[in-house]
Amino acid sequence: MRVLGDWSCWSCSTRTGEEEEEERRTELHHSDSLSDNFTALQEHTLQQSVKASFAGTMLHVKLWWLASISAMLLFSPPTTPYPAASDKGRRKVVHVLEDDTGAVIVQTAPGKVVTHRGGTITLPCRFRHEPENVDPARIRIKWTKVTDAFQFEDVFVALGRQQRAFGPYRGRVALEQAGPGDASVIIHNITLQDYGRYECEVTNDMEDDTGFVSLDLEGVVFPYYPRLGRYKLNYHEAEEACKQQDAILASHSQLHKAWLEGLDWCNAGWLEDGSVQYPIAHPRDQCGRKDTPAGVRNYGYRHKEDERYDAFCFTSKLNGQVYFLKRFKKVNYPEALKACQRDGSAVAKVGQLYAAWKFQLLDRCEAGWVEDGSVRYPIVNPRARCGGSEPGVRNLGFPDKKFRLYGVYCFRKNSNSPEAQTTQASIGTTTKFTNSTRSI
């Protein structure tokens, strides 16, 4: 009975194999569905978390960015715009501080002021304060010469009633004093070395501003090479060669102006900024090919000690007169020196002969000795048998000083030459400054 009962209960709970397999597949499918739903729920939850985190981060970034912009606007100093095209040629800077001293503003003349050697010129410079209630005794005015190599040479300084000029400017420079706000200076007895760019600086306690003025000279550019021949001068030798001939090394702007006036020279020469250039008015194959345009050819900046070229010199109006010494016979070079000395003068330098040709319109169709041992003559009005169809100073080279005979060009300095007055004034001025040791 027990066995039959057990069998009877077993048979009641037993299902066929197909039913069990079907139920197992259904359970697996249901389990997979639950797993997929759970995975999807996890992914959805993760995405929501990431979005929330990203949104929070972006909110912090935006708040930080807005705070940074606000801080920049609040604490950054005001900026000065670039000068307009009309301000070209001058520098104008306004400094603004947060105290009560105000700003000083300097204005100088755009372009250039032009004079000649021996002349007098005013370098204009004016200033004003904002506000204008400033003690004049606290205003410091300083003038400095600036070279192309960014080297500075002190010219003049004034503090209240105290004034002082420096070096070669002593006895020649003074304030114009045309009224309040005038920082202009007057330079007397202009020299060749005065040519260049000047800085006017006005200072009031911690406030300062600067302006620039360019001083140009009327003059003439001429090519030069010594008795040794062409391409024999390094930069320093070229500088000294021009100085010995009463000139200075020309600037690029001076050479360019000479080219515009017709200067044509096929040999490269040093300029004052250390570059080597040469002007061509009539292009030709011997001078950089005929098919190249006319202009100032530029070799760029060259090594000042090792490389050798000619020189382009510049000179200006004379403080005297060049003349051809009339004699019954021609002379050699030593005799020419003595002849000019007996006439109360000296043999003219090359630069002096060019200046006489340019400013005195010296025109003489007779070759004569000049100081460096060369033989030259000036032609203003070209004519037959006088060296070509163009005006200029003709150069016959460096003949033998002892055996070749020519005339001679002499130079006599004016009796009231500003150079002599400058020397006397400098002596007196030097004594005055020696007695005054107070620094400005």
Image (cartoon, helix red, strand yellow):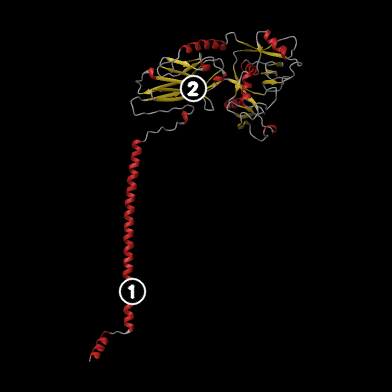
Residue 12 picture location, percent across and down: 25, 86
Q: Which mark is residue 144?
A: 2
In this image, 411 relative to 328: left or right? left
Q: Which residue is identified by label 1?
A: 29
Q: CA distance from mark 1 to mark 2?
A: 97 Å
Residue drawn at the location 32% of the way across and 63% of the way down? 42
Q: Earlier in the sequence, mark 1 or mark 2?
A: 1
The kind of secondary structure element at disc 1 is helix
Residue 23 picture location, percent across and down: 31, 79
Q: Quadrant of residue 138?
A: top left
Crowding near pointer 2: few (<14 within 10 Å), some, many (20+)?
Answer: some
The front one of 3 and 286 is 3
Which quarter shows the C terminus? top left
For badge 2, the amino acid type reads: Thr
Residue 175 appears anywhere in the view? no
Number of numbered discs overlaid on the protein picture: 2
Above-or-below relation of 305 to 114? below
In this image, 146 relative to 30: left or right? right
Above-or-below relation of 311 to 330? below
Residue 378 picture location, percent across and down: 67, 18
Q: Quadrant of residue 135?
A: top left
Residue 31 appears anywhere in the view? yes
The kind of secondary structure element at disc 2 is strand
Residue 193 picture location, percent across and down: 56, 20
Q: Quadrant of residue 258?
A: top right
Residue drawn at the location 48% of the way across and 12% of the way down? 434
Which quarter shows the N terminus? bottom left
Above-or-below relation of 11 to 287? below
Q: Verify CB contact (< 8 Å) between mark 1 and mark 2.
A: no
Residue extending farthest to the right is 403
Residue drawn at the location 60% of the way across and 21% of the way down? 248
For badge 1, the amino acid type reads: His
